[in-house]
Amino acid sequence: MGPDRQLRPATQSDVAREVGVSRTLVSFAFRDAPGVSDETKQAIFDAAKRLGYRPNAAAADLARKHRSAVGLYLMDIHNEVYADILSGVRMSLPQARNRLILSVSQPIDGVDPGAVDSLIEARVGIIIAATLLDPDERVRELAQIVPIVSVARPVPGVDSVYSDDDAGARAATEHLLSLGHTRIAHLGGPDYDGHTVRRRSYEKTMRDAGMVPWTVPADDFTQDAGQRAAAELLDSVDRPTAIFTHNDLFALAAREAAYARGLAIPGDLSLVGYDNSRTGRLHGIDLTSVDLHAVELGSVAGAVAMDRLNNPDAPIADERLTPELVVRSSTAPAPM
């Protein structure tokens, strides 16, 4: 190995010399193009590994005039549900051919256009978005620039993979009603397109049962905002005996606010979350929660993204998963 090779990364030409083939044949091997025997392809891959050569996927995309990279937008890295969605997406992508480029928003101050713009600027072939706060019309506009798969939120006219939030919120509310609770509050999220289904379902279920809905929305999707909204509920004169929250993060916030006021769970206050997060399943927390099957959401979204990349003219996908209420010890019959 000459001194120049020690100072620069290996190239396709280096691999070609090592194997004794043309650089074009090396390029064909890494693009999985026809015309390269399995034996030669393996020799090329082995030589590349010895030399430390790594193919430039972005350059290959430009050469093929095809964008194979997948952009993944996550609304909040602090919320475990998005980590689960990421795991599902990674399971469904063929690692040899598709790069995954991650962009994370901040849940504070609402819409964060920069997070999506960075993926567009990275020239990804498709964006898996979990979950955008933009209005539906804006999401459709973005999808005209780069195809989008909306995760955990259905957007008409855009590929969507989501859980049936109406059914999930109804199951959560009916569970608390079945335990004899009448003062059931909902700690909701901010009012954005596609993010009010759980609230509306809770309110309808309460009215159908002859009860008065009691909704307090948080300022944003952070745990601090959830704790402030929970404090408003728990400091009221006739405080609720049960709270159904928009997600598990808010349920944990409500739990902290309750303990700060000397309230026992579930003796004084029953809690139901939404997401079925790993933290909520821990011993000592045992949170009753609606499982939206986040890993499966990510896996199905990845499959939809691959289908869209391979079949740009395919019909719009609308994949709705059925959530499941998982009952644990954070809920109990209403106190007498």
Image: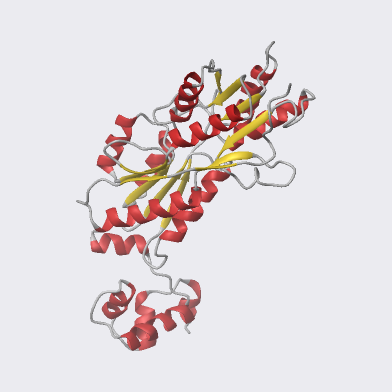
Residue lying farthest left? 313
> At 61% from the left edge and 22% from the top edge, which residue is drawn?
229
Query: x and y percent of residue 127 in the render?
Result: 36, 47
On-image quarter of the C terminus: top right
Q: Quadrant of residue 173?
A: top right
> At 65% from the left edge and 42% from the top edge, which residue is drawn?
280
Q: Is residue 199 above or below residue 60?
A: above
Q: Name the one closer to the observer, 234 or 15.
A: 234
In the image, is 40 to the left or to the right of 268? left
Query: x and y percent of residue 148 in the render?
Result: 33, 44
In the image, is 267 to the left or to the right of 159? right
> At 46% from the left edge and 27% from the top edge, which residue is drawn?
201
Q: Is residue 226 above or below residue 238?
A: below
Q: Name the one closer to the observer, 186 or 204.
A: 204
- Residue 246 visible within the image: no
> At 63% from the left edge and 24% from the top edge, which residue is drawn?
181
Query: x and y percent of residue 307 in the render?
Result: 29, 56
- Residue 316 visible within the image: yes
In the image, is 251 to the left or to the right of 28? right
Residue lying farthest top? 237
Query: x and y percent of residue 317 in the render?
Result: 29, 47
Q: Quadrant of residue 318?
A: top left
